[in-house]
Image (spheres, rainbow, N blue to C red):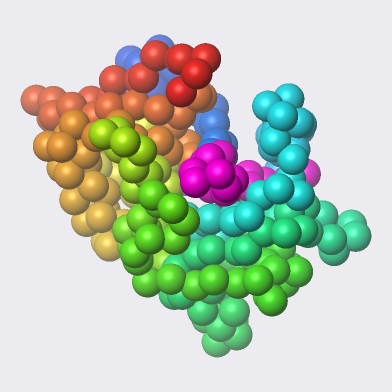
Amino acid sequence: MLRNITPEGAAAMLTEAFRPVPRVTSVNCYAIHSAGRLALVETGCGNTMQDSAGKLLQNMAAAGLDPAKVEAVILTHMHPDHSNGLTDPASGKPFFPNAELVMHADEWAHWHDDARMAQAPEMMRIRYFPSARQQAAPYRDRLRLHRGGEVFPGVTAMPLQGHTPGHTGYMVASGTETLFIWGDIVHVPEVQIPRPEVAIEFDTDSAAAIATRRRVLDMVATDRLLIAGMHMHFPGYAHIMRAPEGYRMVPEAWRQAL
Ligand SMILES: [Zn+2]
């Protein structure tokens, strides 16, 4: 799936980092409490991918979070591992009946563009486009599209175009602390953090995705930001430092009370 690196080169980097080959990927979602309100950043893949994924509703129950109390579901982008947990495909009912659906306007437009769907690679045409439309449909009346700016109290959208046309990160501010939820800036952290030029086949615009990754890595290393990512290893928080080649991740230690 990776571009600008050989399979052997990527496997060697994973092995060097004590990770299994083929890779194992986390799919994280984040809950935000702010101003007495509850938002979710993404919904994971529902029951449409592997048995080891799609645990959002169970994990919310364990954390005492009621899906009916979620006021906003905020998306970094619409790919099956991010937005297929919005709606039950069997019943067509939304899992978050009182939530607004929040995403970049270009993201919504991309997945609802018939001409783009017709031109898309087969996997996108038969799987990604239909599932994005089906998953988002029950939220049509509660849709809030943005082009950046504050989308929830203390949560500011930062467009990070490339992986998809409306791919967006979210800066979360609380008191003196800041967390940057960077979406899919990396899919394979052990490879793409040291070598930001390595791209993944799901990028709609691979050159833009690489440029965005370089810009974001530079920003978070310079500003020493705590980052969260949908494919950072669970629990999904890290810092990024400059390294002799590219960058290096420093996972955040788990804290029971974040
Ligand atoms: Zn993803």
Please give the range of residues in magenta.
31-47
- Residue 236 position, x and y percent, is 46, 29
Q: Is residue 212 above or below residue 111?
A: above
- Residue 102, x across and y down, in percent: 54, 63
Magenta highlight on residue 46: yes
- In this view, the residue farthest toward the right is 91
Q: Nearer the viewer, residue 147 or 84?
A: 147
Residue 197 visible (yes or no): no
**What residue appears at the point 73 percent right and 25 percent down from the top-left corner?**
62
Q: Residue 125, located in which quarter of the rendered image?
A: bottom right
Q: Residue furthest front?
A: 36
Q: Is residue 39 left or right of 155 when viewed as pictured? A: right
Task: State how many labels appear.
Answer: 0
Up the image or down, 39 lies above or below 119; here it is above
Q: Residue at x 62, y 63 (%)?
A: 100
Q: Looking at the image, which is closer to me, 32 or 58?
A: 32
Residue at coordinates 53% horizontally, 55% vertically from top-left? 74
Which residue appears at 77% of the width and 58% of the height? 97
186 and 68: which is toward the camera:
68
Q: Is residue 109 left or right of residue 7?
A: right
Q: Is residue 157 above or below residue 214?
A: below
The residue furthest left is 244
Can residue 51 be seen by looking at this rendering? yes
**From the viewer's perspective, is 133 left or right of 5?**
right
Asked if the magenta segment contains residue 10, the reply would be: no
Viewer-proximal residue among 98 and 4? 98
- Would you identify the image quadrant in which residue 253 lies? top left
Image spot of residue 184 (x, y percent): 42, 47
Question: Where is residue 163 shown, x and y percent of the image?
Answer: 40, 58
